[in-house]
Image (cartoon, grey):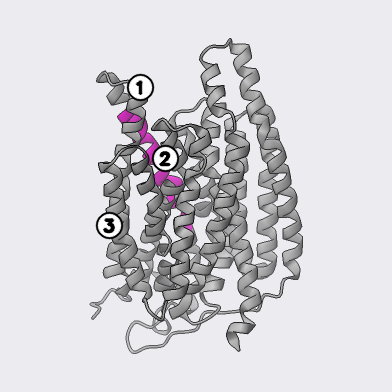
Amino acid sequence: MKSKTNLVPILIIAGLFFIFGFVTWINGALIPFMKTINELTDAQSYLVATASYISFVTMALPASYILNRIGYRKGMSLGLIVMAIGALIFIPAAEARTYWVFLSGIFIQGIGMTLLQTAANPYITILGPIDSGAKRIAIMGIANKTAGAMGSLIFGTLLLSGIDEVKEKLGHVSIDEKGVLLDTMADSVFLPYLIMAIVLFVLGILIRKAPLPHVEAAEVKDIKGGASEKSSIFQFPHLWLGVLTLFVYVGAEVIAGDTIIAYGISLGFSAADAKFFTTFTLLAMVCTYTLGVILIPKYLKQGTALKISAALGIIFSTCILMTTGFTSVLFVAALGIANALVWPAIWPLTLEGLGKFTKTASALLIMAISGGAIIPPLYGRMVDSRKHELIVSGIDKAEAMGTAATHSYWILIPCYAIILFFALKGHKYKSWTKTK
């Protein structure tokens, strides 16, 4: 009976995951688009990811405070409206073709998503039994990544159509003609972001009437190390290891999804073909999420799923470094398989046993999403540095771009190694004293 009672709230929260999945995963198309219209380096172009994810650091704790004051429903409504405001900023940004204005709009959208994430993730985790939390979050992941695949395709078509021809013309036209070409290309964001703003605003109004029941995390009482015996979140080592793990995971996930289009272009694929590559990653995630829904927890424990995911991440990252061309692109996309069950497993494994500290811990986990703001630009800086070294050594510029982009994926290996440690041992450290 309880599962039927929870069906409507689960569908509503899945709808929210669909929304911020759509908004988040269009970054894969925005990065090469911004790089072209604002004439950026690789490192500068990945500030799109930074602007989107850094808001989780600055706003996670304020978002937790806001939710405590106004409640989940009003908080979700406010988040959607803030996202709508961020979308509207793209219109003057396109008119001025000014990168920092674009980044401001992305940052404001990130603030809205922080409110949504801070409410939705712990809500769906504690809506039912904690041992099936990964299953419910996997359902959210299906909604999130399906929307991401749609967003990537739609915005890839809208923003990257004709980009190859524009880039070819830029090297042969006058400064005035270049300005006209880039201004025309920038204007292509006007209509889609106006529509996005209207949809988000309407949904923000509607969510206030949504039938979402009040839920609280259960207080866990055990003989040693229970939440009832502790007075501070600093007494839970597994929480801090979970925060670190989520930090590196989000960085790895963003690299897998947001760099793959630019990576394909650097290997010589046309933008018309490369625009589909993010969809490969997201479809791989959706298929694996579906397996998670079927297998967890009846056939597969959350911890075991995390171990398998981390091991696959290390294997696929190594394969990217050892292959070239479309094969290498496919291994980047295959990271979607490795990534899919990491987020669903980290949340319940980290929140287990926290009781009254669950809300604060959730805010810390949301702050860990900032890994998506820091690790992808590091990848971009590594690409720029390696590309410069190869060009200086006499390698053709086009070849240097592809080689540099491929070799820089080594940054993923330590990320997945940290995830593997958390899966094997880290989540078991419920106290600073020795854990059996």
Q: Amino acid at mark 1?
A: Lys
Residue 417 numbered mark, or none? 3
Q: Amino acid at mark 3?
A: Ala
Provide the major secondary structure of the magenta segment.
Answer: helix
Residue shown at 55% from the left, 52% from the top: 148
Horizontal side of 369 relative to 327 (left or right) equals right
Relative image position of residue 271 (x, y in whole percent): 51, 33
Q: Which residues are magenta?
A: 367-387
Residue pointed to by mark 2: 377
Does residue 377 show up magenta in the picture? Answer: yes
Q: Secondary structure at mark 1?
A: helix
Q: Is residue 365 above or below residue 166?
A: below
Q: Amino acid at mark 2?
A: Pro
Instruction: Bin the neighbour count of mark 3 within 10 Å (Cα to Cα): few under 14, some 14-19, many 20 and up.
Output: some
Which circle's residue, 2 or 3, is located before the other in the chain?
Answer: 2
Q: Is residue 1 above or below residue 21?
A: below
Residue 397 numbered mark, or none? 1
Residue 233 figure quarter: bottom left
Closer to viewer: mark 2 or mark 3 = 3
Q: Is residue 93 above or below residue 332?
A: above
